[in-house]
Amino acid sequence: MAVTPIEVFVAAGADRWHEAQALRAHELVRLVPTPRHATVLLVAGTILESERAALDRVHDQLPHPREVVTWDEIAAAVDMADDVVDAVAFEIVGRADAVVADPTTSSPTRLPDEETHEWRDVGPFGQGGEGMMGGTPYGRAMAMTADDRDGLRLDRLQLRLGPFLGQLPGGLVADVALQGEVIQSIEFACAGSAPVVTGDRSVPVARRLLWLSHALHVQGLDAFAVRAARLARRSSGVGDDSRLASDFSSLRRRLRWTGLRSALRDVGDRDGVDTWARWSAHLDAISASLDGADPRLSPAGGSMPITAAELAETITGLTLTDAVSTIIGFDIDVPAMTTAAVEP
């Protein structure tokens, strides 16, 4: 009998983000890109005090009935690391079934049901009395037209991405100015000038495969993302790994027909290395690890560290879609923050 998976949104800190991707391999759950489609909020890893408000906003976007499951509490009760994913999946299913059976136990709303900013200025729509421009309705400045990088005059939209945006690594926060879908400026609020690590030879093959699973999900290739997550579980000792190398080779061959190469070539070029070259270097490293060879990335993969400021320079002028693909290619290791962690 087919089992309908429980839809889960993951809010993960930087220290558990990769591990949480392993749930893509589990048939009992399905990771969704928005909390509005989820029944369960999975909180994984260290949640910082500075991230508390963002976590509460994500929580309140889940429709009732909803439940919250904490990865670290379950992991602490499991003896074998390889069993954590199964234990988390089973807990998610049990808690989801219980809250659906009795909706009165649904996790209560955390934030007050009110606007975060008061209505301001004199016009009926907060426009400041000068037509529809220049006002600050609810304390938010209205988007104003400005010349973009191509000489067009478009509304400039300021927004913050992260720290729990499914397309980006856990804990990463980016303040972005957009005109259309083109990034006019971007600043990584949490990364500062700390190095963004790529090409670390000590990274286990399981983590590389989980990186690939997330990357394929972001590209809309969810069937391939599931296969990569299952290979990651096998590489960490869950299941038969006798055909692991050949199964990965089969997956990589199939990726040639997806159009990924065409989509990522000449995107995010830095020092003559584009996003497709970085992705290919990750794939080469996985193949090398599974074949028992040296897994270090080739020079074409951009194995030298890059600062957050350099990354921002690289993706400015790209569309938001291409920028996300470029960020993923660098495999960002979000630095630990000094702010104290809080209970989820």
Image (cartoon, helix red, strand yellow):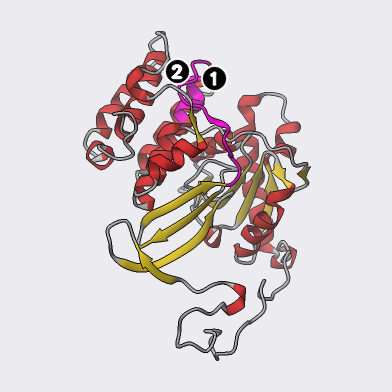
Task: Quickly name the residue at label 1.
Answer: 237
Where residue 208 sits: x, y (%)? Answer: 46, 26
- Residue 57 to residue 77: above or below: below
Q: Are marks 1 and 2 in contact (CB under 8 Å)?
A: yes
C-alpha separation, residue under disc 1 versus residue under disc 2 = 8 Å
Where residue 54 sits: x, y (%)? Answer: 65, 56
- Residue 282 to residue 120: above or below: above
Q: Residue at x 59, y 89 (%)?
A: 122
Q: Which range of residues does the magenta coloring cover?
A: 189-209
| Left or right of 298 on screen, residue 235 | right
Front-most of 245 and 164? 164
Where on the picture, by quarter, is residue 279? top left
- Residue 319 to residue 235: above or below: below
Q: Which SS type dominates the magenta stretch? A: loop
Q: Which residue lies furthest to the top in this view?
A: 293
Q: Residue at x 38, y 14 (%)?
A: 288
Asked if the magenta segment contains residue 289, the reply would be: no
Where on the picture, by quarter, is residue 115? bottom right
Front-most of 129 and 80? 129
- Number of labels in the image equals 2
| Left or right of 314 on screen, residue 74 | right
Asked if the magenta segment contains residue 195, the reply would be: yes
Q: Which mark is residue 241?
A: 2
